[in-house]
């Protein structure tokens, strides 16, 4: 069992709930397998309909079917989707995404701002009245533009308020905008990891660092060290070959020092049974130290 570092802003009366949320979400490993289902706003329908995507992925319920059957740490999606489907999927561990924006305006044309939709207090009331297993909240920060100060302030408040109520706080933190020349620059990503640590986040979802357009797991070490006690989650990205994905995930954890992943398309852009097996394979690598070959066996069923 991984030793749990309880943040100092978690009050004594909320420590047991925080510990429970952390242990359950990480399977006792200290690593988080986050099933990301927030792309219907972020990417509109591009990730859910088209060539190579199974027809059922166009229905939002596909995400909930996967989350209810697969082994995951948390399922992260917007509050509205949870409110529409959670009565039928009340055993899913949820993380409520508190902001989102579309990609219709290019980041090179205008500095992005993704404003908070709901308050943490709204989520706490919903958790109490619904009885759902809501373990945390998430928020995206874009640094590098004129609006970063507003998002950083919102993020700091969200992290603190989540901790007050014994919940986890996950920050998506991406450098974006006309001043950002390379989103995958390892040194820049390490800087973003340090920002998340200063916000007090439990986990931060980051871009994967590249060198000359290629992933090398050792490039992650600067970011995972800069993050300190904030666990680094690498984004899953576009759907790729299963073995390639699992090999990179294994290397991110065991060479780069990451503490999990935030994966969407590489799971949900599959028919239900295959999506569940892929999620289970990712969970095994992330939380159970499974080898790539063991994960491939899980994927094959």
Image (cartoon, helix red, strand yellow):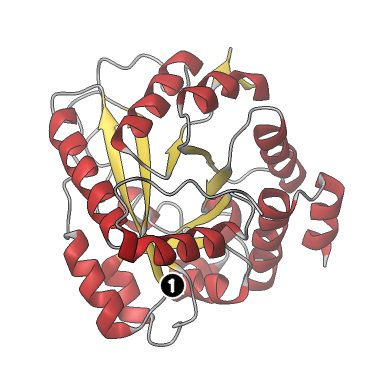
Q: Is residue 290 above or below residue 81?
A: above
Furthest residue toward front: 12
The residue where tag 1 is placed is 59
Find residue 125 and report its horizontal and vertical position in percent: 21, 75
- Seen at 38% across and 56% down, the residue is 38
Q: Is residue 123 left or right of residue 73?
A: left
Find residue 21 and report its horizontal and vertical position in percent: 46, 63
Task: Report the front residue among 29 and 238.
Answer: 29
- Seen at 25% across and 42% down, the residue is 104
- Seen at 47% across and 31% down, the residue is 207
Task: Report the front residue among 164 and 36.
Answer: 164
- Seen at 35% across and 83% down, the residue is 131
Mark 1: give few (<14), some (14-19) or many (20+) Cα within 10 Å: few
Q: Is residue 49 above or below residue 212?
A: below
Find residue 233 and report its horizontal and vertical position in percent: 52, 41
Location of the N terminus by quadrant is bottom right
Q: How many marks?
A: 1
Task: Report the front residue among 184 and 92.
Answer: 92
* Secondary element at image label 1: loop
Task: Report the front residue among 16 and 45.
Answer: 16
Find residue 53 and report its horizontal and vertical position in percent: 56, 59
Report whether residue 166 is seen: no
Location of the C terminus by quadrant is bottom right
Q: Is residue 188 above or below residue 198?
A: above
Report whether residue 250 is seen: yes
Q: Is residue 265 left or right of residue 273?
A: left
Q: Is residue 143 left or right of residue 185?
A: left
């Amino acid at each position: 069992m991984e030793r749990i570092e309880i943040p100092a802003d978690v009050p004594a009366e909320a420590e047991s709930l925080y510990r429970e949320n952390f242990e359950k979400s990480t399977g006792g490993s200290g690593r988080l397998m986050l099933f990301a289902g927030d792309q219907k706003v972020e990417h509109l329908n591009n990730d859910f309909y088209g060539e190579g995507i199974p027809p059922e992925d166009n229905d939002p319920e596909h995400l909930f079917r996967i989350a209810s059957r697969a082994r995951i740490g948390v399922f992260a999606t917007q509050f509205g989707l949870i409110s529409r489907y959670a009565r039928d999927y009340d055993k899913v561990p949820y993380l409520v995404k508190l902001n989102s924006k579309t990609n219709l305006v290019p980041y090179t044309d205008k500095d992005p701002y993704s404003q908070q939709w709901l308050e943490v207090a709204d989520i706490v009331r919903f958790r109490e009245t619904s009885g759902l297993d809501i373990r945390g909240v998430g928020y995206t920060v874009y640094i590098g533009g004129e609006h970063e100060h507003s998002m950083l302030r919102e993020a700091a408040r969200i992290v603190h308020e989540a901790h007050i109520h014994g919940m986890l706080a996950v920050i998506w933190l991406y450098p974006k905008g006309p001043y950002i020349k390379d989103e995958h620059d390892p040194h820049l990503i390490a800087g973003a990891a340090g920002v998340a640590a200063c916000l007090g986040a439990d986990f931060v979802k980051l871009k994967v660092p590249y060198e000359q357009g290629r992933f090398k797991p050792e490039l992650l070490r600067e970011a995972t060290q800069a993050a300190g006690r904030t666990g680094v989650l690498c984004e899953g990205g576009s759907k790729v070959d299963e073995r390639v994905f699992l090999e990179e995930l294994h290397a991110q954890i065991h060479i780069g020092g990451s503490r999990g992943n935030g994966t969407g398309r590489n799971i949900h852009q599959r028919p239900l049974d295959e999506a569940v097996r892929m999620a289970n394979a990712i969970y095994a690598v992330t939380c159970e130290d499974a080898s790539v070959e063991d994960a491939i066996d899980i994927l094959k069923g």
